[in-house]
Image (cartoon, grey):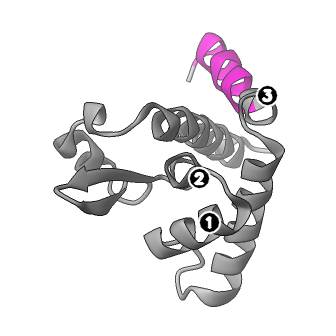
């Protein structure tokens, strides 16, 4: 990542506090804590997203995007694509299948993940 891309990623990550409501950020933090304590892989699942979105009264699509889970409809069913673990799957489904809320949150997730990966690769 060059300096311009790094600055862009950091700018997107700063949008977490600007673009997302307090309730959505609280739901995100609580869901991550719950997954860490209760899921064998320490990562939220679709059912966790739905449960915490209902409890905090936030959009499940937006909350899911913050952890790389993107919902779309197949008939009357909601299907979750795990774009965090299987990025090619989201591309195969087609990014236009996912709503704007999910994509805004997913963009923040991707920028944060890139920033963390870059920092982990830096020698201190």
Q: Nearer the viewer, mark 1 or mark 2?
A: 1
Q: Quadrant of residue 98?
A: top left
**SS category of the residue bearing label 1:** helix
The residue depicted at 26 percent of the width and 38 percent of the height is: 97
Q: Viewer-proximal residue, 10 or 19?
A: 19
Q: What type of secondary structure mainly makes up the magenta span?
A: helix
Q: Position of residue 33 (x, y in %)?
A: 74, 74
Give me the disc on residue 54: 1
Q: Position of residue 122 (x, y in %)?
A: 71, 41
Kindly report the distance in space between the C-alpha atoms of the residues bearing marks 3 and 1. 22 Å
Q: Earlier in the sequence, mark 3 or mark 2?
A: 3
The residue depicted at 54 percent of the width and 32 percent of the height is: 104
**SS category of the residue bearing label 3:** helix
Give me the disc on residue 18: 3
Circles 1 and 2 in contact, beta carbons < 8 Å = no
Q: Is residue 60 magenta?
A: no
């Amino acid at each position: 990542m060059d300096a311009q891309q790094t600055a862009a990623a950091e700018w997107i990550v700063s949008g977490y506090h600007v673009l997302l409501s307090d309730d959505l950020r609280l739901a995100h933090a609580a869901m991550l804590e719950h997954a860490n304590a209760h899921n064998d892989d320490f990562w939220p699942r679709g059912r966790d997203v739905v449960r915490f979105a209902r409890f905090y009264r936030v959009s499940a699509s937006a909350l899911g995007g913050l952890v790389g889970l993107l919902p779309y409809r197949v008939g009357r069913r909601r299907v979750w694509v795990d774009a965090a673990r299987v990025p090619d799957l989201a591309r195969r489904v087609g990014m236009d299948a996912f709503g704007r809320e999910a994509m805004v949150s997913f963009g923040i997730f991707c920028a944060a993940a890139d920033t963390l990966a870059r920092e982990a690769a830096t020698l201190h």
